[in-house]
Image (cartoon, rainbow, N blue to C red):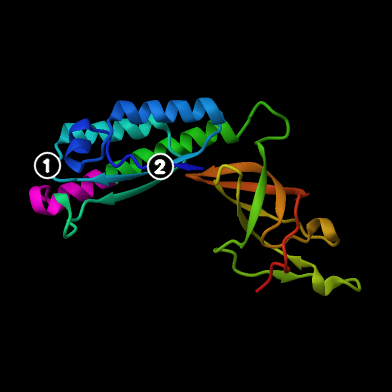
Amino acid sequence: QLHLPAQSGSNAVLERMRRGYTREAYLDLVGRARAIIGPDLSISSDFIAGFCGETEEEHRSTVDLIRTVGFDQAYLFAYSLRERTHAAYHLQDDVPSEVKARRLQELINTWRTDVTERNMAVELRENEPDGGRVHVVLVDGEARRNKAMAMSATGPDAKHVPEFAAVTGRTDSNKRIVFRVPKGQGEDVLIRPGDYALVRVSAVTGHTLRGEYVSRSGLVGEGALQR
């Protein structure tokens, strides 16, 4: 994933921020990066809502930039004055807090809608008999919402073979994916944090993917995934 902070889609706001680039230069950089790395390049960014003097038109330019680029991850914040900065010395924090909150929510909603639609189109392949794309996933550990991990209890090596309800990891484009590991015995279903697994996408929930475990792949991590 390539992190390219934009902060705003308005040239006027970028100038007030003293960012040193324009909207057009930013879009050119994104285009060149995708031309070199490929269309699957994952891009993340930062945006600020309600910077000093921001107008509705300038805000709409930021909304439009989010739609135009298609970010896989975005870090979105309402502006707050920071001491000892150019803005603190020379600009006025004149956008009302309720306007900042509304604009921030519009940025969030725009990004969530866009990333969901793109993930639906790219990750789920309805015309293919086997369903969605298969990713090589780096296993992080047990999914946060997984209530319990059952332990299988048969066979001489059963105590070394955990059985997981849900596991989380990251694709090679840094997309978060939560996937189920099937019940069973043997090395092929024993996965650990740091392992790589082949996972087929089965659903999209916003910017998070859901998937089904296919098999283990690549390097093996150290230490079984357990509490």
Is residue 39 visible to us here?
no
- Residue position marked by numbered label 2 in the rendering: 112
Indicate whether 177 appears above or below 15: below
Residue 78 coordinates in the image, percent (x, y): 24, 51
Neighbours of disc 2 within 10 Å: few (<14), some (14-19), many (20+): some
Instruction: Name the element at disc 2.
Output: helix
User: Which residue occupies the foreground of this view, 88 or 66?
Assistant: 88
Residue at image position (15%, 40%) is 54
Q: Nearer the viewer, residue 156 or 135?
A: 135
- Tell me: 46 left or right of 81: right
Viewer-nearest of discs 1 and 2: 1
- Circle 1 residue: 53
Report crowding for label 1: few under 14, some 14 to 19, many 20 or more residues within 10 A (C-alpha): some
Secondary structure beneath disc 1?
loop
Q: Position of residue 63 (x, y in %)?
A: 29, 35
User: Which disc, if any, is residue 224?
Assistant: none
- Tell me the distance, in whole angstroms, between the alpha carbons under discs 1 and 2: 26 Å
Q: Main secondary structure of the magenta part?
A: helix
Q: Amino acid at mark 1?
A: Gly
For the magenta stretch, what is the residue range?
Answer: 87-104
- Total number of numbered labels? 2
**Quadrant where the C terminus lies?**
bottom right
Check residue 108 for magenta coloring: no
Magenta run includes residue 98: yes
- The residue depicted at 42 percent of the width and 35 percent of the height is 114
Horizontal and vertical percent position of residue 99: 16, 47
Q: Quadrant of residue 146?
A: bottom right
